[in-house]
Image (spheres, grey):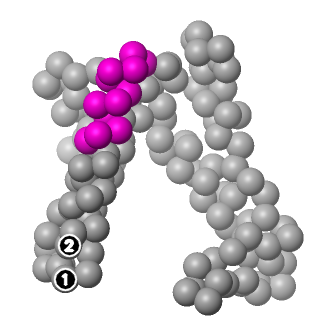
Amino acid sequence: MSTSPARLVRAFHLAFGLDARSTPTEVAAALAAHRGELLAEEAAEVAEVAVDGPLDRLAHELADVVYVAYGTALVHGIDLDEVIAEIHRANMSKLGPDGQVARRADGKVLKGEHYRAPDVSAVLRRQGWTADGAA
């Protein structure tokens, strides 16, 4: 069995009769709100254990966030792997051509002059999305 989060979550959604779209689509407000609530619940559980652990519970809660995020993407018909690849491309452009990294005092990597923002709309259009919501 593949350990790809996208495939695993799709298998779960299909097995349990949950929404699993293959083209980016706006969904009903109630469903979108429900998915947002599920994500917020999982993120709160991560925040609860992030500092004091234990580590195995943190790992569990982080995986739950990813699982629910992939499920939310699937409900909307978004190929999240492709979106993540685009975000990664943009994040990597934060590295200057000289290999230098600009950081905030707390260590967060900042956008430099060579940063190129992600074009998530283009990724979704390649997946069949139109800005008006029709596929």
* Residue position for label 2: 49
Quarter-wise, where is residue 74 in the image?
top left
Residue at (78, 57) in percent of width and height:
116
31 drawn magenta: yes
Instruction: Indicate the amino acid at tag 1.
Output: Asp
| Whole-percent x, y for residue 70 in the image | 36, 41
**Residue 52: mark in rendering:** 1
Quarter-wise, where is residue 94 in the image?
bottom right
| SS at circle 1 | loop
Q: Does residue 52 lie above or below 5 as drawn?
A: below
Q: Does residue 88 lie above or below 134 as drawn?
A: below
Residue 45 is left or right of residue 104, and the answer is left
**Residue 12: mark in rendering:** none
| SS at circle 2 | helix
Which quarter of the rendering shows the N terminus? top left
Q: Does residue 114 lie above or below 52 as drawn?
A: above
| Whole-percent x, y for residue 67 in the image | 28, 47
Instruction: Indicate the amino acid at tag 2.
Output: Val
Residue 128 is left or right of residue 95, and the answer is left
